[in-house]
Image: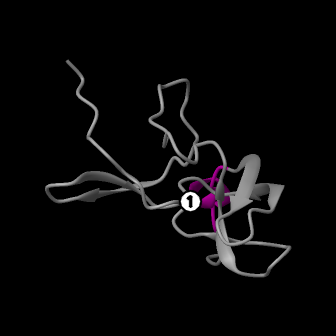
Amino acid sequence: MSNVIELDAHRIGWATGMVRCDACQHEWISVFHPPLLGAIDCPECMRSMGWPKWPLTSGKEIFTCGDCEGTTFQLVRNDGLMCCRCGSLREVPNND
């Protein structure tokens, strides 16, 4: 039986949580593999624009957008953090 594969070595954890579509704002509960490397297909508008509404944090403090409560940002050189959901800019938080 040389074709036997040990399944425990290939198991990937699962997460479940609220997901919101950035295109149509539809919200639903989804099951996915963390870390989420791409958007989830929205069952309402069928676009791949669904992201977890709340990040998987293990109890850590999360920075959210003050305009739309988004939690996904891009770092923009000389401008700070840009919310990927609404496009507003924020200064990078200081940990001091």
Is 34 above or below relative to 42? above
Part of the protein shown in magenta: 5-13
- Residue in the foreground of this view, choosing between 9 and 39: 39
Image quadrant occupied by the N terminus: bottom right
Neighbourhood count class around disc 1 (C-alpha, 10 Å): few under 14, some 14–19, many 20 upward: few
User: Measured along the vertical axis of the image, is residue 14 above or below residue 64?
Assistant: below
- Residue 84 placement, left or right of 58: left
Residue 81 belongs to magenta span: no
The quadrant of the rendering that contains the C terminus is top left
Mark 1 highlights which residue?
36
* Position in image of residue 59 (x %, y %): 55, 23
**x, y percent for residue 51:** 63, 59
Residue at position x 62%, y 55% from top?
12
Q: Is residue 3 above or below residue 88?
A: below
Front one among 11 and 90:
90
Colour scheme of the picture = one colour
Identify which residue is drawn at 50% across, 39% down: 66
Left or right of 78 in this view: 53: right
Residue 80 coordinates in the image, percent (x, y): 24, 50
Which of these two is toward me, 85 or 62?
85
User: Which residue is pictured at 57% across the width and 43% down the height?
Assistant: 69
| Amino acid type, label 1 | Leu
Is residue 53 found left or right of 37 in the rendered image?
Answer: right
